[in-house]
Image (cartoon, grey):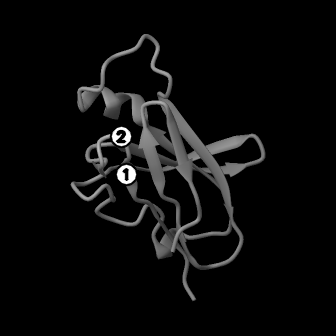
């Protein structure tokens, strides 16, 4: 089996996919945080390519960083200074080659995530 990483971001306040949200991926090794990829979600709230493709997959600790504040600003969500949610880091482990799917359900005042399929 091969491993790779995907996501899907849904704007639960607006009831639609979160289009245009910037996502960064980092590999975590102890105190070292190495950038691996930066992508933008499409009209379906997904990225056009795998965040971490099979060819680059390694087990270990990773961090997805969702730039929610910029997305909320772009969608016309009433501004706050500072925003309650701005940058959302999710740190997680991938322990074996598999499809890791890490969705984000987002609103201006909360979010949830889980290991999807």
Q: Nearer the viewer, residue 17 or 32?
A: 17
Find residue 108 and report its horizontal and vertical position in percent. Answer: 42, 31
* Residue 5, position as x, y percentages in the image: 50, 66
Query: Mark 1 — residue?
Result: 10
Residue 61 visible in this rendered orientation of the protein:
no
12 sits to left or right of 102:
left
Among the 4 quarters of the image, the one containing residue 72: top left
Task: Report crowding for label 1: few under 14, some 14 to 19, many 20 or more residues within 10 A (C-alpha).
Answer: many
The residue drawn where x is 32% and y is 34% is 71
| Contact (Cβ within 8 Å) of mark 1 with mark 2 | no
**Secondary structure of the residue carrying numbered label 1:** strand
Horizontal side of 50 relative to 29 (left or right) equals left
As displayed, is residue 78 above or below residue 61? above
- The residue at which mark 2 appears reads as 13
Front residue of this view, candidates 8 and 78: 78
Residue at image coords 47%, 51%: 104
Mark 1 vs mark 2, CA separation in Å? 9 Å
């Amino acid at each position: 089996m091969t491993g790779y990483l995907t996501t899907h971001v849904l704007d639960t306040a607006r009831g639609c996919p979160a289009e245009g949200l910037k996502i960064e991926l980092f590999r975590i090794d102890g105190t070292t945080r190495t950038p691996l990829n930066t992508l933008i979600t499409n009209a379906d709230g997904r990225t056009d390519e795998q965040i971490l493709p099979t060819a680059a997959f390694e087990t270990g600790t990773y961090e997805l960083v969702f730039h929610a504040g910029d997305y909320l600003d772009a969608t016309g969500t009433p501004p706050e200074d500072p925003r309650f949610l701005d940058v959302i880091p999710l740190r997680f482990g991938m322990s074996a080659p598999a499809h890791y799917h890490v969705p984000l359900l987002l609103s201006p005042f909360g979010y949830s995530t889980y290991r999807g399929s």
